[in-house]
Amino acid sequence: MQEYFLRRLLMLAPVMFLVSIMVFSIIRLVPGDVVELMLVESGNVRNMELAREQLGLTKPFHEQYLIWLWGVARGEFGNSLWTGRPVRDEILKRLPVTLELATLAMLISLCIAIPVGIISAIRQDTWPDYAGRLVSIGGLSVPDFWIATLIIGFSSLWFHWMPRPGYIPLFQDPGTNLQQFILPALAMGAALSASVMRMTRSQMLEVLRQDYIRTAWAKGLRERSVIIRHALKNAMIPVITIMGVQFGYLMGGTVVMEVIFSLPGLGKSTLDAIFQRDYPQLQANVLLAALVMVTVNLLVDLFYAWFDPRIRYR
Amino acid sequence: MGPTLGYLAASLALVALVGCGPAAQPGAPSTEPRPGQAQAQPKYGGSLRMAGFELRHMDPHRTIGEEYTSGPLYNGLVTYKPLTAFDDYVVTPDLAESWETSPDGLVYTFKIRQGAKFHNGDPVTIEDIVFSLERLRAKDPEALKAYLLDAVDKIEAAGPSTLRLVLKEPYAPLLTLLGQPFPVIVSKKLVEQNNNSLKQVEAGSGPFKLLTYERGARFVMEKYPDYWDKGKPYLDTIEYIIMPDYAARTAAFRAGQIDIHDWYRGADVLQIPKSNPDAIQEKWIGLFPMQVAFNVAKTPFNDLRVRRAFSLIMDRWAIAKSVNVIGPGYLSAPLPRSVGGKWVIPEEKIEETLPYYKRDAAKAKQLLAEAGLSNGFKTSLIIRRDLLNYVSMAEIFKENLKEIGVDMEIKGLEVGAQTRALVARDFEIIGSARATPVGDPDDGLWGAFFSGSGQNYGDVRDKKLDELLIKQRRTLDERERKKLLDETQVYLADQAYWLFISDADYASAWHPYVKSFRRTFARHVILEEAWLDKDK
């Protein structure tokens, strides 16, 4: 088990290295650079080469890459080409927003998906099952931004109410903060819950057919005990995989909600960095997202091993 | 187009003249008292909340977008009178109490007021003023508005409270351009202490000072108690909430979470008065007109007949209607209202005054035949994919061109790619080649059309046009200048280097408790004058 853990940890390095090369190259292949974007309106084209030099963009590709990589190894991610501020500060400010939004969305997703999935499974092919599956198709099909815009639009139109705009951190004013986050989290959670619910349902159906469940029924255990203590735990494993992947996606996938609800998170920061060709910001954001994804997957795998004694890793 | 003004264009908004028609006269807004009614006494206190875009940084001499947010922190030599119609730029004293021009128009002498202080307590001295103007036009790649002072040869202190600007040649736009948000006065000491950068630090003397800037969340300014204009400002704080999404802003305005809603268009212009009947809305046009530029260096657009044919076949009214949504829309001339209402051709006269505006398919076909292209040809139009008004326009234009056998491919690019195409001149026809000019006609003409000029991406080299442009910027007499500008506009339409297309209604709205306010470009004074009639 420890061996497995160490092996996985070591694999982190080559994966991150590959990600760094990819993001570094791909963004530079896209036409247009930050200098053009800054200077085009002024027509200050004579100064473009000078501006590029000042920003270090005229050095050869591999030199730029090594300079950047060396900085990363020392924990320095450079300054944003767009604002001039340190990239690290921007990330530290925005990470809590995205984390809070992602966590709340996942919690809401779980609160909807697990109970509905279980009920769908144990009352298979009855109307609660149909209702649950219909809701889940709805959640998969309806875009979360549409729901969000409807919520904001109608609540302001009918009730002349809207949560106070302008992000307030959680520890500064939890009441307002939660008001600001609950609507986007609901919209996202509803969309996320669909796949989790379907996976829960199908896994439960499979597990409920197992012999040991039949034994539990035969032993005369109550329904709640059979479902939750015996069946659910075993059904959860693939569900947790999905949730791990979803969380990784959420690190950037919150961007639409961030724009609509004016929450300054990493998603919007990454999108802006792409449009502005802000290479250092983009590279750091993508590295962070990759790190989160890899770490979450590692945690999920370790969780399996701890959770299910049948699984032993060499 | 730069992203910030590009965002503005995409987000569509501008305050327009009160009135519904293209020929609307600048009318008094309902915030002003009616004749015979006593002026309400301004109340002190309160926090004004507005919605804005994220700032790149705060340095007024190195930016082209953020000054509208951080504007209240600074003073310039002059500014514009508040509470006018948005296209009425009336130059009024700011840090300069008065000024004189020499008879030949080459020397401007400004008398600087005494007693103004920076927010750190230091007095505003003549050294700071000279330093600030030099900094605006420094040889720095990021000195984006350096060209505003191109006509100025020397910037000198002619005494402890006298500034002298010596020009190379007479330059009519100078005073109006000095009122723009860029030539502001900063503290020399603070700039030098901060490594010549004001990106993260403010160094102003304006009615408000920076309280806090939480990136992505809000930009908050508070009243500067030692402001030189005693008794002002009335507000305690101004809070700019960073809200990039327009639907969210409309919702926030309806819910009373923001006090002013800036620059929206489309259905909201009709809906907001319905949902908030007591709110004051002002409509206006002339800030986001659409135009496309030909690459005159490439065939067949080097042929005048082809360009004229394109102008004749374009159905401008159809485009205007599709973009404006709530009404038939407007045609736009080379000079939009944002350069100053006194210089423009009235909207209802545009079609009859400018050649090649009235649609004529037969004539277009004939012109193409004369150019030897009666079999048509293929071409392409590059537009910004995120600007929906350009997308509408492109679709209609493509259909129009089919009538004369031209197959135009529409390439919808994102900002960076379109910018690259523009700068590299890698286009045949391109949209958004010019940011909307503000304040003076020269801003919209010189850069884009003078031979060899930096923003002349379409590669226009026309001697007659160059002469006209030089003449109009040297003519100090306004009536003469207007004649020259009319001639220039007619000539531009006649040569069809660019096609000027259409414009739409934009609006701003504010709640009734916001008094003494009108949305214009007068940087800080509009917020200096404003006050809240609330019981908070």
Image (spheres, grey):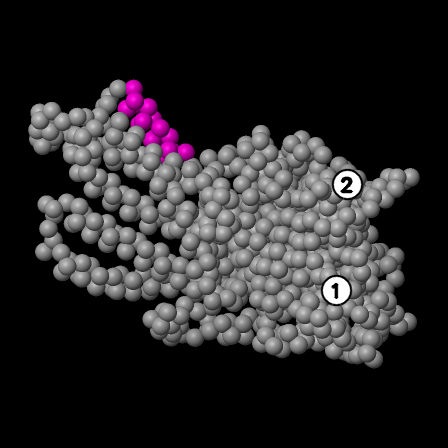
Let me know if residue A132 is in the magenta part: yes
Q: CA distance from mark 2 to mark 1?
A: 36 Å
User: Who's the residue at 68% across and 70% down the image?
Assistant: B120
Q: Tell me, for residue B226, which label it has, or none.
A: 1
Residue B374 position in % (x across, y down): 59, 46
The three-letter code of the residue at mark 1 reads Asp
Query: In the picture shown, does residue B465 fall above or below A96?
Result: below
Q: As drawn, which residue projects farthest toward the top? A: A126
Kindly state the secondary structure of the residue where label 1 is placed.
loop
Q: Quadrant of residue B251?
A: top right
Q: Quadrant of residue B211?
A: bottom right
Q: Quadrant of the C terminus of chain B?
A: top right
Query: In the picture shown, does residue B78 fall above or below A55?
Result: above
Question: Which residues make up the magenta segment?
Answer: A127-142
Q: Quadrant of residue B134?
A: bottom right
The three-letter code of the residue at mark 2 reads Val
Residue A97 position in % (x across, y down): 44, 51
The answer, for residue B247, to whether it is visible in the render is: no
Let me know if residue A60 is in the magenta part: no
User: Who's the residue at 28% across and 52% down the image?
Assistant: A296
* Residue assigned mark 2: B18
User: Who's the residue at 14% across and 59% down the image?
Assistant: A2
Chain hosting mark 2: B
